[in-house]
Amino acid sequence: MPSVQDFEKLGLFYLGREYDLDARRRTDAPILYDSRDLVTHAVCVGMTGSGKTGLCLSLLEEAAIDGIPAIAIDPKGDIANLLLTFPRLAPEEFRPWVAEDEARRKGLDPDAFAAAEAGRWTKGLAEWGQDAARIQRLRSAVEFSIYTPRSRSGRGLSILKSFSAPPAAVRDDPDAIGDRIRSAATSLLSLIGIEADPLKSREHALVSTLLGHAWRAGRDLTIEAIVGEVQRPPVSRIGALDLESFFPEKDRFELAMRLNGLLAAPGFDAWLEGDPLDIGGLLFTPQGRPRLSIISTAHLSEAERMFATSLVLSETVTWVRAQPGTSSLRAI
């Protein structure tokens, strides 16, 4: 059986033990994954039930133990189970999470069921060379935060404040500002049910022009401001065409009405509440402590989920481009 000394080494993620297919049993050889292999990109694929989620949760836990922050977008709502950690493996830690119906089916009262679960966890972890001390190390290494955009059930995340002008380094980079504009325009239009092709959609062309005009001047925008500028654009031409030929005022008013519907929708204010969508802030607390930030989107509609995810990814790309090179894993 592997000991803590075998796998508790900085930069090595302990993912379990090797399995002997011929003997059909686990061996004592630990599987240690070099975190440097995640410095660029990775993808995890497999059939349903093959263990993709379990593997990725293990990677996040191992990264957290090493003090490596992470941002996890959670469309199914199960990554938050990372917070179900019990550093003493004591029955009283399990008791609040006992499903009393399940305990009843097992013929146990809730306290006895909690004690049985604590024993099962203790035994199961010991089989893999782990103990309560390692759970405590995980809890101490990072701050866990669950964000729920457009919902007050978790920590708020102000997604719609992302229409603020990007930093000067992004504005001065034609590729970076172009990507940011396209992503923001596509995301906003998808939220009102417009699947806009950047090369063909006049809605996308107009919103992109408005964003570009404001951001290149260092001017922030809000949804309210975008609604107003759709009706009265601060430009007279879109590409080679004059504004009225390309997008007549009557048609612009219809687009403005759809965007205004967002402002009038029940619960819209929740999109504006909470921490700003700042990647650095999602990865580290103001005191510099690493964070594992889980952005739960399971409660959102498909269009809202795509909107939130697109903006998070766009902000992440902007943050990544501002970082110097590294040979070790900085964040996930």
Image (cartoon, helix red, strand yellow):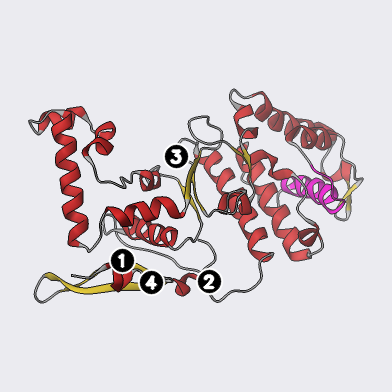
* Residue 280 circle label: none
Question: Which of disc 1 and disc 3 is earlier in sequence?
Answer: 1
Q: Residues within 10 Å of mark 1 (few under 14, many from 20)?
A: some
Total labels drawn: 4
Nearer the viewer's eye, disc 3 or disc 2?
Answer: 2
Q: Is residue 135 above or below residue 21?
A: above
Q: Whole-Å distance between the Cαs marked 4 and 3?
A: 35 Å
* Residue on which the image places disc 2: 40
Q: Whole-Å distance between the Cαs marked 3 and 1?
A: 27 Å
Q: Residues within 10 Å of mark 3 (few under 14, many from 20)?
A: some
**Residue 258 makes an appearance in the image:** yes
Question: Which of disc 1 and disc 2 is earlier in sequence?
Answer: 1
Q: Whole-Å distance between the Cαs marked 4 and 1?
A: 13 Å
Side (left or right) of 210 relative to 236: left
- Amino acid, disc 2: Thr
Residue range of the region highlighted in magenta in the rendering? 202-220
Nearer the viewer's eye, disc 4 or disc 3?
Answer: 4
Question: Which of disc 1 and disc 4 is earlier in sequence?
Answer: 4
Side (left or right) of 4 relative to 65: left
Q: Residues within 10 Å of mark 4 (few under 14, many from 20)?
A: few
Give yes or no for contact between labels 3 and 1 (Cβ–Cβ under 8 Å): no
Q: Nearer the viewer, residue 239 or 120?
A: 120
Nearer the viewer's eye, disc 3 or disc 1?
Answer: 1
Nearer the viewer's eye, disc 4 or disc 1?
Answer: 4
Q: Residue at x 40, y 50 (%)?
A: 139
